[in-house]
Amino acid sequence: MGDLTLLRDVQPDGYPAGSGDEARETTRALAREEGNAGFSSGANVAAALRLLAGSEAGKCVAVVICDSGLK
């Protein structure tokens, strides 16, 4: 992460984990609502939604969805 020097000494707060079913459901919802989403995008958004429903309720959570655009 040489280009992210501001994060060099920052330790992560945790690593949210979810089920494949949850990721698939979120992927399908993203595809319906936004037009295109891959499995990893669904998993990332599902994790963010889980955080917002729990310990991060009322806060702001950012999710970056990377897409090569090949589909």
Image (cartoon, helix red, strand yellow):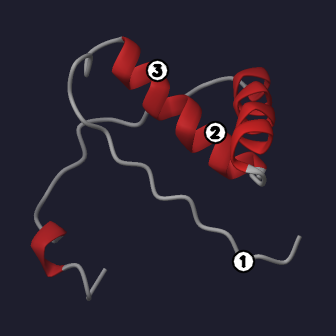
Q: Which residue is mark 2?
A: 43
Residue, far top: 54
Measuring from the top left, give residue 50's x and y in whole percent: 46, 20
Query: Does residue 34 appear to the left or right of 61 in the view shown?
Result: right
Q: Which residue is mark 1?
A: 68
Q: On screen, 69 above or below 54?
A: below
Between the residue at mark 1 and the residue at mark 2, the CA separation in whole angstroms equals: 17 Å
- Secondary structure of the residue carrying numbered label 3: helix
What's the mark number on residue 42? none
Q: Residues within 10 Å of mark 1 (few under 14, many from 20)?
A: few
Circle nearer the N terminus (2, 3): 2
Q: Residues within 10 Å of mark 3 (few under 14, many from 20)?
A: some
Measuring from the top left, give residue 35's x and y in whole percent: 77, 51
The quadrant where residue 59 appears = top left
Q: On screen, 24 above or below 53?
A: below
Between the residue at mark 2 and the residue at mark 3, the CA separation in whole angstroms equals: 10 Å
**Looking at the rendering, in which quadrant would you find the N terminus?**
bottom left
